């Protein structure tokens, strides 16, 4: 083993502190960065609007199931039931937020345009989905999930399935 000079242990301490700071800052960057769920906002030409609507319909089915299970677990006080209740509430919130993000980050920024002759109607229908998703987040009533599904179904005429 080589003999250390007086300054080497102090230098190793400084290097370790600097590395700790670098990794800490890099870690915070990963934690604080926002995930991007929506498709890119450039005209790449690979959009599948119908698939996005179908995905939102799957999300609303998950919300409806979550609401049913929340209501089943609501009166139970054992730890497992409480744990599952919290998980279903979080699940309901996450899927409602996904729908809100899809409408606002994808459809309203890229598909609903002021140049469309029925712009006001389209805007209203898309906004109705956002409001219905918000209500589904706030409540644990199946009627809110069904209203959300109805509002998404109203978009299907704008985004028909394309067969190639």
Image (cartoon, rainbow, N blue to C red):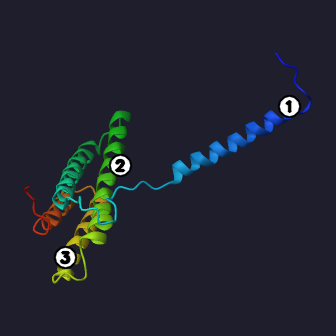
**Distance Cα–Cα, label 3 vs label 1:** 69 Å
**Distance Cα–Cα, label 1 vs label 2:** 52 Å
| Disc with the residue nearer the chain's start (3 vs 1) | 1
* Mark 1 element type: helix
Query: Mark 2 highlights which residue?
Result: 90
> Foreground: 92 or 14?
14
Report if the CB atoms under discs 3 and 1 are less than 8 Å apart: no
| Disc with the residue nearer the chain's start (3 vs 2) | 2
Q: Label 3 neighbourhood size at 10 Å, few (<14), some (14-19), many (20+)?
A: many
The residue lying at 18 percent from left, 55 percent from top is 51
Q: Is residue 24 left or right of residue 87?
A: right
Query: Mark 3 highlights which residue?
Result: 122
* Residue 2, percent from left and from top: 84, 19
**Quadrant of residue 138 in the image?**
bottom left
Q: Seen from this angle, which residue lies furthest top?
A: 1
* Mark 3 element type: helix
* Residue 162, percent from left and from top: 10, 59
**Distance Cα–Cα, label 3 vs label 2:** 30 Å
Query: Mark 1 highlights which residue?
Result: 8
> Foreground: 7 or 79?
7
């Amino acid at each position: 083993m080589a003999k250390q000079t007086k300054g080497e242990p102090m230098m190793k301490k400084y290097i370790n502190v600097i590395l700790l700071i670098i990794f800490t800052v890099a870690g915070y960057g990963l934690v604080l960065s926002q995930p991007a769920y929506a498709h890119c906002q450039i005209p790449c030409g690979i959009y599948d609007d119908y698939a996005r609507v179908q995905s939102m319909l799957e999300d609303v089915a998950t919300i409806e199931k979550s609401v049913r299970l929340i209501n089943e677990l609501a009166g139970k006080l054992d730890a497992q039931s409480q744990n599952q209740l919290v998980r279903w509430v979080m699940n309901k919130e996450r899927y409602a937020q996904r729908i809100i993000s899809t409408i606002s980050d994808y459809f309203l920024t890229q598909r609903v345009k002021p140049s469309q002759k029925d712009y006001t109607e389209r805007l209203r229908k898309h906004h109705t989905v956002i409001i219905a998703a918000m209500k589904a987040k706030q409540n644990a009533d199946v009627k809110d999930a069904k209203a959300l599904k109805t509002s998404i179904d109203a978009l299907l005429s704008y985004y028909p399935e394309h067969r190639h």
